[in-house]
Image: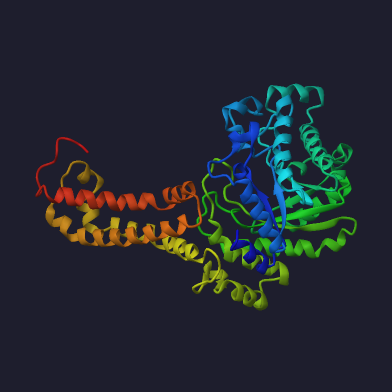
Amino acid sequence: MKQIFPLFSSLGADGVLLEYEDMFPYHGNLTILRSPYAYSMEDIEEIKSLAKLNNLELIPLVQVFGHLEFVLKHERYFHLREVRAFPNSLNPHHPGSVALVKDMVSQVMDCHPDARWFHMGADEVRGLGESQDSKNWLQSNKGDVGKMFLNHAVSLARFITERRSGVRVILWDDMLRKISPATIKESGLPDLASPTIWNYLKKMDTDGIGTLISRYHEAGFKGVWFASAFKGGTGIDQRWTPLDYQLQNHLSWIKVMNSMTKYPSITLHGILLTGWQRFEHHTVLCELLPVGIPSLAMCLQSLKHGAFDEKAKMEAHHILGCNIKVEKDICEGSGAFSGSQIYHMVFYIHTNLQKEVEALMKHYHIKGGFSRYHRKYNFANPRIIGFFQGLLKKLLDKWETYIENFRMEMEGIYFPDTVEEWMEENVNANMDLLRENARDAERILKLNGQPKSLKTL
């Protein structure tokens, strides 16, 4: 935070939306929710101080309906699931559900007494309407799932606003899109919260966004937020940020922002540049934050200047110490930004490791004389092994050294579980293949071309 908050500020950000999930130091009955690497209260105080020092407004986010996998994965809370088999969403009718999320919200709010905004999530409530409780409710309420959603959302939004006078509530808008403006207005939600219209697509339907703005205005909302993505919104296991994709997303949002004069009665509060780490709690990591920094710079500068023009490029270059080449998906140059070493090392791994390993495995003599079958039965001609063993050892030694240096860089920033996960997902399969082939070559070479082993490995 000491390094990235000043960077965020210099690039043009004026706030940070902070979704703690299991990193918040929940206490009391909620202690079970904490990650082994959760922040301490002292950590949060430091985060707040650093944000203030860098003129960044903190907006805490606590999910209150969907995306509660980090809570509902625990057996203690299985009975609060909307779909018993899945940990995604909360059953809004169980008396323990509202008490649970109110406790979560309260603990986070207590740590952020100066927050002007509070984001309660409420997006992608998977399976809503599928529990027996929900089916019973729907039978008595004309099958109106939208109204069911609104009842829970209004309950929590009202709780937040009553708990602290003056705080304003935000929620994601996707669950509102199919609900009629009249139903939303009747619920009272527009008096309590502002929707965040989110879209992370490269080719965004800007006219469709305009329709949503009109619908929310009709529903009685006085203001809206927008949300783009600078990373983490493309592939579920995306390793490298596609710059043109993210740029086009933001250019579309700029077009929408420039059209807001058509809606004089509704205020645009701001735009949230999301940088998701995962699609959800149980999925793999998307791009690491250092990998997404050039994209963040490009997107923020585009919002500031209205386009990623020469002035925006020069300002980004001055701050990052490298030149953003959209067409190449890279920031060229050594880079002086926090995390730049990891940025360049991930790029090298991304572009070379698998390619070099696959090229070696296509070697004529490995394909023809040292296949999985040969290795399984300890059966190979030493002469054939001699044709590739040196190349194999050289490639393995090169990558062992590189990966060890990369691991040390990662451990300087990330907790051990994150380092292990990223290595397992992006490195280990290729490295294990090299190691296994090297070990097998050394072992089978000593057999001097003997007949197949009766005992398989």
Relative to the observer, which residue lies in front, 362 or 233? 233
At x 35%, y 52%, the residue is: 430
Residue 128 vs 426, above or below: the answer is above
State whether residue 120 appears in this view: no
State whether residue 337 appears in this view: yes
Q: Quadrant of residue 305?
A: bottom right
Q: Whole-percent x and y of residue 134? A: 73, 25
Please, which colouring scheme is shown?
rainbow
Q: Whole-percent x and y of residue 258? A: 79, 65
Relative to the observer, which residue lies in front, 298 or 11? 11
Residue 333 vs 194, above or below: the answer is below
At x 72%, y 23%, the residue is: 133
At x 88%, y 48%, the residue is: 218
- Quarter the C terminus occupies: top left
Q: Which residue occupies the extreme front position in the image? A: 42
Q: Quadrant of residue 57?
A: bottom right
Q: Left or right: where does residue 342 sit relative to residue 106?
A: left
Q: Whole-percent x and y of residue 407? A: 41, 56
Q: Left or right: where does residue 373 sit relative to residue 10?
A: left
Across the whole image, how many numbered discs are drawn on residues? 0
Relative to the observer, which residue lies in front, 287 or 51? 51
Q: Whole-percent x and y of residue 86? A: 59, 31
- Quarter the N terminus occupies: bottom right
At x 53%, y 43%, the residue is: 283
